[in-house]
Amino acid sequence: MTNTTTAPIRIMLVDDHKTMLWGLEKLIEGAGPALSLVGTAHNNASALLEASRLRPDLIVLDLDLEGSSSIEVLPQLLRDSGARVLILSGNRDQALLAQAVRLGARGVVGKEAPAEVLLRAIERVHAGEMHLDASLMGALLGQPAPAKADPEAQRIASLTPKERKIVTIVVESNGAPNKELAAKLFIAEPTLRNNLTSIYQKLGVGNRLELYVYATRHGL
């Protein structure tokens, strides 16, 4: 890996698997003066704390941390650290990865990728470029992802444009009552309830809270 600047790229690693962290540490340390490991974290709370304290140039972030998704803290992580974020994840859910990119991540590398691919991605993201594969670009551009990438694709595809809009309003409403949601959508409250019932049946959820969790998880 070539070093195009005098100062090394200051990297923070976030992963909840000790073996993976150890391997990544050795990879960064063995890359020469171009890279400098400044810290590690293993869950959302420690990631926010250490990123704010260390203010690295780049954060290599796993999406699944001790049973929680780092998607939940990604905007704050970017804001507090001022760093660029590269996702390194074993999760191949294209909708979830696309959501991470929409929230500000600059690249995605699978954990199965060779070491040289990760090092190249670090270099590109630090230089201000994006590092995304073709299937993820397709998801970001609204093209259908391969069925195996998202087992919920058929359910989501069954939603009408109006129902997708309702899902968006529900997610953004922060628990607002149905009356307020109906006003935003310019429809009657009974009509909203009927639409929500249809959405629940199509997505296999039982209420607005489950719908919020589902929509957030699948990037709706």
Image (tube, rainbow, N blue to C red):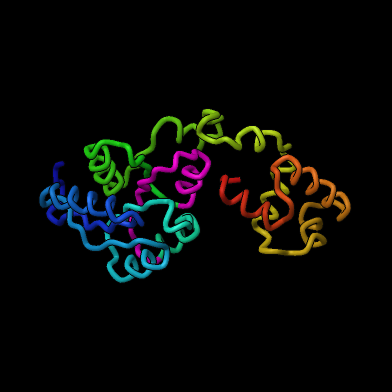
Q: Where is residue 101 in the image (x, y as percent from the top left)?
A: 45, 46
Please state if 190 lies on the left or on the right of 61 as rendered. Answer: right
Please state if 174 lies on the left or on the right of 130 as rendered. Answer: right
Asked whether 95 or 168 is in front, the reply is 95
Please state if 38 lies on the left or on the right of 97 as rendered. Answer: left
Quadrant, the C terminus: top right
Q: Quadrant of residue 182?
A: bottom right
Which residue lies at the image location 50% right of the left edge and 59% below the top edge?
Answer: 72
Which residue lies at the image location 23% right of the left edge and 39% below the top edge?
Answer: 115
Which residue lies at the image location 62% right of the left edge and 49% below the top edge?
Answer: 214
Placement of 201 over or under 213, stated as above or below: above
Q: Where is residue 49 in the image (x, y as percent from the top left)?
A: 36, 70
Placement of 38 over or under 128, stated as above or below: below
Placement of 147 over or under 203, stated as above or below: above
Q: How many labels were placed on the picture?
A: 0
Q: In which quarter of the image is residue 179?
A: bottom right
Quadrant, the N terminus: top left
Which residue lies at the image location 46% right of the left edge and 49% below the top edge?
Answer: 100
Q: Where is residue 166 in the image (x, y as percent from the top left)?
A: 73, 49
Magenta span includes 99: yes
Q: What stretch is highlighted in magenta?
A: 80-103
Q: Where is residue 206 in the image (x, y as percent from the top left)?
A: 74, 51
